[in-house]
Amino acid sequence: MSFRISHTSLRVVVVVACAALVALALTSQPAGLAAPSGETTLHARYAVAGPVSKVVFGAQTMPLKFSHRKHLERSPLACTYCHDRADDSVSAVDNLLPTEADCATCHAIDRSKHDKKVAPGKAPARCLACHTRVDPATGFVPRMHIPVPNLKFNHKAHVARNIACTTCHGDMRTVDLATRKQLPKMALCLTCHNGRKTSGACSTCHLAAPGGVLRTAFVQGKLAPSGSLRGSAHDATFAVSHRAIAQSNSRFCANCHRKSFCANCHNGVRKPMRIHANDYVATHVIDAKRNSPNCSGCHRIQSFCVGCHSRSGVVADGRGSEFMGPSTGMLRRYHPVGWVIADENGVIRGKRGLTHYSWAAQRNIRQCAACHRDEFCTKCHSNRPGAFARVNPHPRNWRNSRRCRALERRAGRMCLRCHITPGEARCNYMAGP
Amino acid sequence: MDSFRRCVRTSVCCAAVAASLLVGARPAAAYDFEVRAQTIGQGYSLRSFRLLSADLVLARRRFAQILQLNLWNLGQPRGPHKKYTNPLHPGPKLYFSSYLRVQHDFGGWTQGHIVDNGKLFDAVDLVPELGRSNLELDVLYGYFAAEGLLGGKLDLYIGRQLSVDTMDWFSMDGITVRVNTPAYVSVEAFGGLRVRGSSPLGSVTNEPDGTAGALCAEYVEGATPGTGSWRPIDRDIPGSGNPFTNDFDFCPQREQLMPTFGGAVETSGLDKVWARLAYRRSQSPSPGVIGDPFRYEYEDLGYYPNEVGQAPDWGVNEERVSASVRTQVDVAGGRGELVPYAAARYSLLHGLFDQAHSGLQARYGAHSVEGEVYYSFPTFDGDSIYNVFSSEPFTDYRITYELHPAGADWRAYSRGWLRKFRSEDAGSDDATGMVDTNEYAGGLQFGARYVARRRLLGRLDLFWDDGYGGRRLGGYGETQWNVNKRLGVAARLSIIKMDAETRDLAGMTYGVQLGTSYQVQTGVVLHLAGESNLNRFNRNDYRVFAILDLAFNPES
């Protein structure tokens, strides 16, 4: 029976598919309805998964001893008391950190007196109260370095929607020095930026080329999915395992990759070095026999493989090849004795042995197709006049099978390549009386 | 047909040049554009095996020119895009995207000759597949797109499209319409002509597989009518002296147009669930009357025997229904994710499931484990005779572990796989040792990658696999060093021990690659690489690669 879905492995497929559907039912809800239980927990919820991207938010240098916790314990200041430009900021390149002038509203800073004393109960004014070091001679303190994030971000638009600072930055009452940990992760952004509640396009926040394709190369490194989105982490094996993610929705890949990115490998003119590394011409035979990785993903076997094998003379197809098949008894041949059991006159001699080619064809017929043009098979396996051996090539239980009927109904002309009378080209045909 | 194709190529080249000039003449502020041109040169040799004399070493001197042109923001419905750090304007997105490629092989591999039965033939006449390296001009895609029409409800694509469908991809000259409904689904419909090798400027790679063109022959008349003979076509003589109109008349099935249509339904806007159900059908007419030769003892009026009308007018080349679903579940309070997925494809042409793939990826912190099951039953173009020889599927079981500590400069992986081939002789032993009777193949891989300060990369991959096909043990070592902002160098070393069924290939193979990339200026990069291999056959196998990569991506 040609209908193979009952195979054990396919049961696994079905079980996993069911699991996926159950998960779908349990977890899915229309975008935009996923409400966090509390604004401050939203940041905390996504912060546990790990740090933010080093490429988006580059490594920071903050030689400070500032404590948000202590400041907020002293008085419930609004965030904008210090970050007074945040409300109106429309770009991620804006510097929203408080300046010395902002601090000076409480701290009586005097640069000429780096060890300035203040009355008890007053905010300290010495440099080392906030800075980690100070040069006593010059009064210089180590500079902060916070790279501009590789993002588009409009604080003003978010504030206008009454999104509290704590939603994205967390509860600062428990934080001393704010670091990259207080920056939002993408998963948090996606609770609103999901295409329904508001724009879900990647280029809404990520830097993009004019066509909307994301920029992925930055001084800080290459931007790539971490895995929190559809399990699409571009890990070390992603080059050979990306099929599953691509087949679910290719438009997802198109956010970062143009079609040329795919075409350069899957229909390219030069070998991708990491897939077909050194000396692949010599070593490809093992991959090709197994069809692992799938050669058809990039090569049309009956064009690319056949053409090359034919030109290199390894195909006994009468095109200048000196390898005339297994029956020549020559030292160099590609198939063992017993590969074919018909003699030169097309008469079957003996039984099919373990070295017969049919076993190889059953395992991976694509390896046959890599050398032999499809016409080659019908030299023997054909019922037409003049065919070599007229050996029936059909799998077991072919007659009247679902597979035969499907092929007959849709591609009946293919049957005519071997069966030239109308009657024998039918699935219900039975030879002999 | 060759002259027609040459004519088409020339016309399209002229049109492309004219279009480029027109485009270049327009004010830059009208749209955003990107141009990328890659000039690729490759030189190496391949062996042509001889039985009675020394093997021939044939040169490949390949040249390829790739031109990618993208025109964004056509008509400026969104207004000019001032700077990439600004948000994109809302509204329709109109653009044109194309990929054009010319390739040619100057070496003897393609341009040489083959002696067959004492007669000298051009290699390309005996092996027509080599024609793909003989002044070949392809347009891999070239389409106009209008996305976000009618307030985001409609997307439209017209032209040559390269589409990734569930479990495969295809190329088509036609139109695709996608409607984004408010009911969390997008509905897609498409129709056109499937791109095949015989399509104008078409690449053969995306044509359904399983049919060849090498038995194309021409009838060369003899001294008196009826005394001629069939012989391989001579592409330099357009059909003179034979009863047909041109050289390709006796292999016309792959010259037929292949109308293709289909549709898909896809989830859209659901949180963490992505699913797609797709249908596609490609079909082609049966070639008509080609003359009056007698191929068999029957009088034959067409490509197929049709004396009593048994040849159908049309045949289906491909008809598939496919579905995929993928979802994501956050676990452990957001510290990890589970990503189950499944996909299957049913071939209506063959009456069976020909592919299925499912898996589960579990990610927790720095650790990721993914198990997969993949099932494949070989199927081919409806015109391929391999459809009736294909009788058994195979199943893969794979498991991959990835380790990528947050913030660390290194990552590592291990991967195992087992492939079970179904066959009638499962478990047999071959006493002769001449044939591989394994019904299993499997292997293990380990690897690690380290990046030091984004300037120095090292990677090591070790592998072992065994079973059907042969045994292989070895590894690759790779390093890249960015000397400065302009210059980078790389090297790759391979050592592999092979034990293949083809005894001639058994043994060690060593390979080394050295390469460098130099940024001449912004948008101009030159890549050079050399490869040397040493194996049982080739003591001195050298390859050189050079790429001049020009990218112009101005911001208006």
Image (cartoon, grey):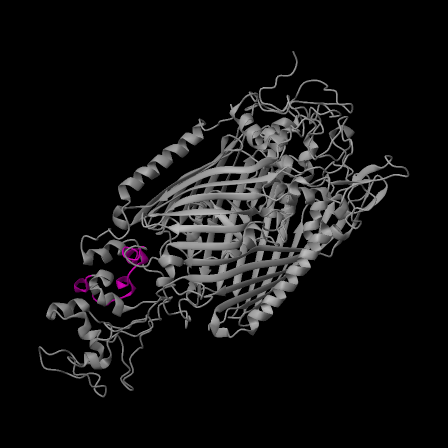
Magenta segment, which residues? A171-194
Residue A308 appears left or right of A38: right
A191 inside magenta stretch: yes
Residue A50 vertical position relative to residue B53 in the rendered view, above or below: below
Give the percent coordinates (x, y) of residue B486.
Answer: 53, 70
B41 inside magenta stretch: no
Residue B481 vertical position relative to residue A120 in the rendered view, above or below: above
Which sits in the foreground, A156 or B142?
B142
- Please tell me how many numbered marks the rendered image carries: 0
Residue A256 appears left or right of B377: left
Which sits in the foreground, A60 or A266?
A266
Q: Quadrant of residue B94?
A: bottom left
Task: Look at the image and tell me whether residue B382 can be seen.
Answer: no
Furthest residue toward bottom: A112
Which residue occupies 12% across, 82% down? A118
Q: Quadrant of residue B516?
A: bottom right
Give the percent coordinates (x, y) of residue A341.
Answer: 71, 23
Give the percent coordinates (x, y) of residue A76.
Answer: 12, 69
Which residue occupies 45% across, 51% down? B177
Residue B300 vertical position relative to residue A117 in the rendered view, above or below: above
Which residue occupies 55% across, 24% down? B426
Task: Look at the image and tell me whether residue B97 can be seen.
Answer: yes
Q: Quadrant of residue B433?
A: top right
Residue A363 vertical position relative to residue B342 in the rendered view, above or below: above
Furthest residue toward right: B223
Give the percent coordinates (x, y) of residue B432.
Answer: 66, 25
Which residue occupies 43% across, 31% down? A10
